[in-house]
Image (cartoon, rainbow, N blue to C red):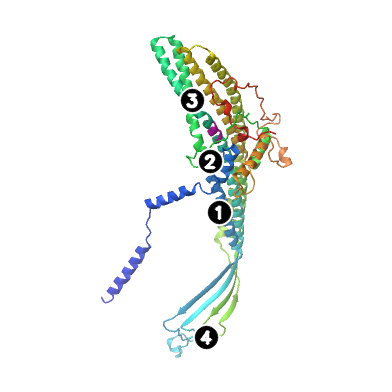
């Protein structure tokens, strides 16, 4: 009973200790989240060059490459992998450890001995002896090198080096996607900035004309069939304009997100007087396919992944071998009974895990299967890359043909509007026809501009499918304008078909997607002669303030 209070105290202390070690979920508070939100909001757009002039396409792409957070994240991931390589390299070094301690006994160690061959208590020596101080200090510095661990760490470091290259390829993929997305968003925003202000009043006129035609139908001022056909035609055009308006309204916020500009910032895009001719990609399919198979980031990533798998095979082979450990240490002991308080110690020790002999063949087979998986995945991605390149090429041809058709239709609609506007009649019927012609002219102009945007979007798909790098080196320390000039020079070469050269033997390889008898298609379709619609425009639909050729492609000197 006397020991019960002590037991209770011990139990209480143990319970308090265990309860103090219990961990419970601790959700973030509203104040903490608000502080985090405000901090992120204040840091999202800082440390950027301000937008002080209307943006050309190359300015927008330069800002996307410098300030887009997806690109920044890919750069930071590459830096992280590089840091982990330093850690993996240090793991190859031998173990060098320093140990120190202090030992104190309540009573000094004492002992006696008995005769080895007669271990009865009667043979025990009556004298007790000690060879150790009650209090003493210990210290040592030990050097240990395990040959097997060194070999495994060596291949782990090689694998980490390849992971750095994989991170760089993923960063290239982000850049390729940025080119595609900025091409699409910039042109959509460019059209929206020029034509949306003109679209709203024309839509209002068209809706008013629709109501007026209904009153004409009720009063039977015109034949019912012609009125209904007019309403059907006008409703289709109104629906077309509303859909285009909805598509164009989201283009500028998308562009702002890509270049990391505040959503409600009023930045302007560069505009000029003439619509530029769409760029023509002067490259044949054999060259585009070989470029894609050579530069595509996903394919290069799989090459490095295969290297990692091969190093994994070597790692598994090493684990089956016996391990050799070589220890070397310098020791110190303050025990006063020792003759030498400091001494050196060295040795060698080998360890052989016999179980690994049974598991070794399975581990090798698994590692070899990883290599085969990487090779098969690379081939599957190669086929997908060829499909994307050919689909992107066909989309480009389709968009180019659609642009030429839309240009011709725009000329016709502008001419119809001019003829109707030049008439002197002012009755309700002629007014309805004039509004219908004006609406159709604006719709055809929007279709033409939309087709031009689709051409650049298709080019972006081709560049993304190929995987070319628009800029080399570190861009963190150069200005947006300098980077924009470099991008303009690079994309001008791409428009001319001046792509990076491949090894000579690869250039002579026939196209994967073509038979030997099939001639390679060149992406230079003939352009139909389209007369200019500028002179036939009566209402200002924006033909006089088209986007600057320099804002989309370099000016030829």
Q: Which residues are magenta?
A: 186-191
Give the foreground label among 1 and 3: 3
Q: Are marks 2 and 1 in contact (CB under 8 Å)?
A: no
Give the foreground label among 4 and 2: 2
Residue receiving disc 2: 258
Q: Earlier in the sequence, mark 1 or mark 3?
A: 1
In three-dimensional space, the C-alpha distance between marks 4 and 3, rounded to whole angstroms, equals: 101 Å
Q: Are marks 4 and 1 in contact (CB under 8 Å)?
A: no
Q: Secondary structure at mark 4?
A: loop
Mark 1 is surrounded, within 10 Å at the Cα level, by few (under 14), some (14 to 19) or many (20 or more) other residues, namely: few
Q: Position of residue 372 (x, y in %)?
A: 60, 46
Mark 3 is surrounded, within 10 Å at the Cα level, by few (under 14), some (14 to 19) or many (20 or more) other residues, namely: many
Q: Are marks 1 and 3 in contact (CB under 8 Å)?
A: no
Residue receiving disc 3: 241
Mark 4 is surrounded, within 10 Å at the Cα level, by few (under 14), some (14 to 19) or many (20 or more) other residues, namely: few
Mark 2 is surrounded, within 10 Å at the Cα level, by few (under 14), some (14 to 19) or many (20 or more) other residues, namely: many
Q: Would residue 41 be seen by someone viewing this image from the given angle?
A: yes
Is 524 left or right of 365, judged from the image as shown?
right
Q: Is residue 321 above or below residue 398?
A: below
Q: Is residue 64 above or below residue 360?
A: above
In three-dimensional space, the C-alpha distance between marks 2 and 1, rounded to whole angstroms, equals: 24 Å
Q: Quadrant of the N terminus?
A: bottom left
Instruction: Please tell me which residue lies in front, 170 or 32.
Output: 32
Q: Position of residue 353 (x, y in %)?
A: 56, 63
Residue receiving disc 1: 80
């Amino acid at each position: 009973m006397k020991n019960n209070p002590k037991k209770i105290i011990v139990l209480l202390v143990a319970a308090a200790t265990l309860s103090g070690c219990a961990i419970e979920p601790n959700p973030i508070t509203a104040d903490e989240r608000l502080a985090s939100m405000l901090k992120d909001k204040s840091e999202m757009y800082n440390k950027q060059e301000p937008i002080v002039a209307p943006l050309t396409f190359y300015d927008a792409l330069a800002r996307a490459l410098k300030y887009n957070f997806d690109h920044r994240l890919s750069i930071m991931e590459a830096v992280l992998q590089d840091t982990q390589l330093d850690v993996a390299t240090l793991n190859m070094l031998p173990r060098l450890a320093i140990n120190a301690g202090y030992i104190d006994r309540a009573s000094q160690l004492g002992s006696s001995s008995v005769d080895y061959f007669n271990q009865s208590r009667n043979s025990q020596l009556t004298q007790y002896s000690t060879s150790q101080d009650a209090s003493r200090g210990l210290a040592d510095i030990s050097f240990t090198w395990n040959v097997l661990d060194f070999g495994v760490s060596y291949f782990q470091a090689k694998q980490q080096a390849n992971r750095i290259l994989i991170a760089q390829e993923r960063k290239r993929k982000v850049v390729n996607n940025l080119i595609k997305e900025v091409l699409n968003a910039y042109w959509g925003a460019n059209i929206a900035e020029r034509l949306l202000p003109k679209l709203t009043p024309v839509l209002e006129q068209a809706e008013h004309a629709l109501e007026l035609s209904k009153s004409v139908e009720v009063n039977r001022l015109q034949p019912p069939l012609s009125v209904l056909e007019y309403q059907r035609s006008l409703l289709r055009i109104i629906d077309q304009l509303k859909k285009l308006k909805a598509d164009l309204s989201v283009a500028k916020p998308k562009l702002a997100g890509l270049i990391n500009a505040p959503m409600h910032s009023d930045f302007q895009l560069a505009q000029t007087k003439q619509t530029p001719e769409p760029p023509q990609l002067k490259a044949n399919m054999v060259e585009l396919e070989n470029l894609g198979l050579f530069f595509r980031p996903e394919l290069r990533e799989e090459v490095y992944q295969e290297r990692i798998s091969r190093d994994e095979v070597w790692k598994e082979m090493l684990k089956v071998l016996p391990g050799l450990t070589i220890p070397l240490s310098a020791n110190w002991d303050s025990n006063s009974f020792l003759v030498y308080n400091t001494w050196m110690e060295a040795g060698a020790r080998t360890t052989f895990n016999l179980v690994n002999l049974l598991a070794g063949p399975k581990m090798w087979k698994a590692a070899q299967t990883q290599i085969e998986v990487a090779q098969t995945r690379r081939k599957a991605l190669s086929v997908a890359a060829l499909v994307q390149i050919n689909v992107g090429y066909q989309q480009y041809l389709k968009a180019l043909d659609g642009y030429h058709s839309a240009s011709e239709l725009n000329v016709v609609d502008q001419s119809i509007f001019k003829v109707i506007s030049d008439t002197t009649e002012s009755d309700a019927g002629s007014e309805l026809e004039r509004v219908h012609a004006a609406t159709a002219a604006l719709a055809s102009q929007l279709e033409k501009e939309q087709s031009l945007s689709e051409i650049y979007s298709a080019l972006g798909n081709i560049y993304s499918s190929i995987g070319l790098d628009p800029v080399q080196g570190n861009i963190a320390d150069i200005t947006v304008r300098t980077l924009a000039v470099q991008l303009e020079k690079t994309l001008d070469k791409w428009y001319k078909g001046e792509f990076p050269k491949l090894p000579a033997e690869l250039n002579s390889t026939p196209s994967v997607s073509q038979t030997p008898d099939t001639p390679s298609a060149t992406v230079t379709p003939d352009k139909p002669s389209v007369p200019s619609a500028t002179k036939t425009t009566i209402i200002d639909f924006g033909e006089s303030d088209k986007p600057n050729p320099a804002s989309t492609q370099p000016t030829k000197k």
